[in-house]
Amino acid sequence: MYQPVAFCGIALALLSSLTACSQVGLQEAGKGVSVAGAVVEMYPSGAIAFGGVSPHGESSDQSVIFRSTGDTAAIVQKIFFSDEGEGAFTLADNPTPFRLEVDEARTLKVRFDPDTQKQYQGAMTVEVRGDEVSWLERAFTGAGCRDQNRDGVCEQGFPEPPVFDSGDTGLD
């Protein structure tokens, strides 16, 4: 599977057909980016699915591994999340910037903490520096839902609202 990677000023372009940008190309998903001798890989490859999480008080963490496999060290400069995730996806701890020496790996925890019952999608973008700048991106999905047994699977339906007697208004 391949994913497009592009850098145009500060925007990450998702279409490989853009020709006015520098550093446009296809990077194999999960294999990372190469920056003048430095290679940083990010695992797992492909989109990361968090499953169902009860809003307000519950969250779920997934590990994301960065590994340096090139000839020189690389710096993971910045990590940020798209607005489409509405703040539900964050890093449990953001140590950026950090340096990855050759053959070194570092694990970070991405947290999904929904604030309402609905489907969430988002993306994490990672700026990697060597002699040049490259970008990695990983998509996330998750569901804010009723998950009373905390197994990541949404229960069917939502709780029933309380029923009131229409004659019981509290007014005499």
Image (cartoon, rainbow, N blue to C red):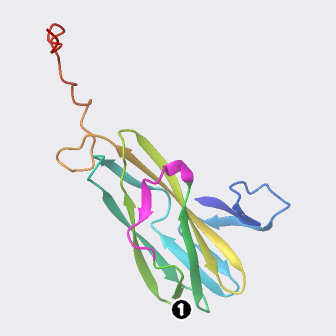
Label tally: 1
The magenta stretch is 83-94
Lateral position of residue 34 relative to residue 78, left or right: right
Residue at image location 59% in from the left, 68% down from the top: 136
| Residue 118 pos. (x, y %) | 39, 39
Residue type beneath disc 1: Val
Q: In which quarter of the image is the C terminus?
A: top left
Q: In this view, does 144 lie above or below 30?
A: above
Residue most toward the front? 172
- Judging by the rendered image, the residue that carries numbered circle 1 is 102
| Residue 46 pos. (x, y %) | 50, 59
Q: Is residue 93 magenta?
A: yes
Q: In this view, does 161 lie above or below 129?
A: above
Q: Which of 151 and 82 is in front in this view?
A: 82
Which secondary structure, mark 1?
loop
Residue at image location 77% in from the left, 66% down from the top: 9
Lateral position of residue 106 relative to residue 100, left or right: left
